[in-house]
Amino acid sequence: MLGPLAEQVRTLGVPVFSDVRQIAPVPDIIHGHHHAQTLAALLCFSETPAIFVCHDATAWHDEPLIFPRVLRYVAVDHRCRKRLEQNTRISPENIHVVLNAVDLSRFTPRPALPAKPVRAAIFSNYASRWTHAAAVTQACKSMGIELDVIGKGSNAASSNPEALLSRYDLVFAKARCALEAMATGSAVVLCDFAGLGPMVSSAGFAELRKLNFGAGTLVRPLDPKLIGDEIEKYDPLDAQLVSQQVRKAASLTDAMTEWTELYREVLGCEELDRKMLDERAPEGRHAEELAAVAEYLARWGYDARITWEKERIEKFLRWPVLGRWFKRAIEREQIRMLQK
């Protein structure tokens, strides 16, 4: 689904497609995320090597793709790295970690924070009355803090959040959203629909960064009292130190250097592999890739999809507000079916 960001990229002269089959030039390398889409790209470009990037430690679509031309596996945090390491078919030397980063030219430092937070924002596409917005709203209201929401779930999406974040003393977010808010100098409480994490402090920054400030940190329930306890930890001077740590350790420029070096490494490996493959019959490599596709289809066919759907429904049922609504909807549907 292409939106305003795709159009912005196109204006810079970069082709953008919503279907891999529309891409005419053969790419040098495939930067793959989600196994189904990565496999489709590999089959479309039969000579191109790939990197597989894992963004989630549990989601089915982030299970690493095992395929002869996937030469490196990249985790965006150390939870994802463990997921890759658990797969015995992936050599440890082929696993890398490239942590999330921030475009520091966009997310610039805000003026000094006030002694106490006055304005706060939830920065998440998942924030709505069905998820965590209600609990955060209650906590902020009890402390006299004005609260806004930035995100698609509340019909308040923005393609330039850097213009908004500097207005807020306190931001509730996770993962890259949290990182971007920290870069501007806002105090950040890690929070999203999955649960509540801590207020990010300069002392805890390094360990939380290993977890990408993401789902692995959201281990407590979305209780307004617990959220209020984290707000009480607000410290404008420490938030400034956190911002300095982000700007030192999470530059997008540095991350792009890591990525391009990894691309060159993969292309170098592919060149060596081609020299070795020249000594083999082309049919051998073709058969190896067909076997990988057959294995993939056997594992991720219809039955696997149904299993995933059931797991997703069970996950919805555990959400604090949406879960109750979903259960009632299922009960009403069951009653309706029985009355037929």
Image (cartoon, grey):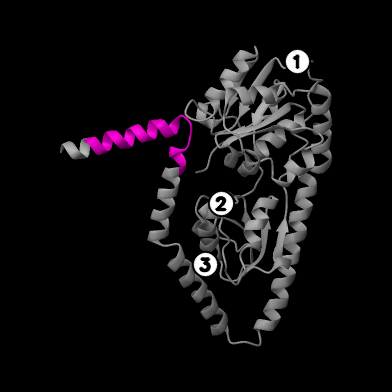
Decide: is 78 above or below 200: below
> Residue at coordinates 74% horizontally, 55% vertically from top-left?
259
Which residue type does callout 3 highlight? Answer: Leu
What's the distance in space between the residues labelled 3 and 2, CA to CA?
A: 26 Å
> Residue at coordinates 52% horizontally, 67% vertically from top-left?
43
Q: Nearer the viewer, residue 269 or 294?
A: 294
> Residue at coordinates 71% horizontally, 74% vertically from top-left?
271
> Residue at coordinates 73% horizontally, 52% vertically from top-left?
98
Closer to the eye: label 3 or 1:
1
Q: Nearer the viewer, residue 102 or 338?
A: 338
Asked if residue 331 is among those painted magenta in the image, a careful observer would answer yes
Decide: is 148 above or below 189: above
Q: Which residues are magenta?
A: 315-335
Q: Label 1 belongs to which residue?
A: 116
The quadrant in which the C terminus is found is top left
Q: Position of residue 103 (x, y in %)?
A: 74, 39
Q: Label 2 belongs to which residue?
A: 58
Can residue 52 be seen at all in this image of the molecule?
Answer: no
**Label annotation for residue 322:** none
Which residue type does callout 2 highlight? Answer: Thr
Asked if residue 5 is among those painted magenta in the image, a careful observer would answer no
Name the quadrant containing residue 35: bottom right
Q: Position of residue 327 (x, y in %)?
A: 36, 35
Whichever of callouts 2 and 1 sits on the residue coming sooner in the sequence is 2
Q: Main secondary structure of the magenta part?
A: helix
What's the distance in space between the residues labelled 2 and 1, CA to CA?
A: 38 Å
Whichever of callouts 3 and 2 sits on the residue coming sooner in the sequence is 3
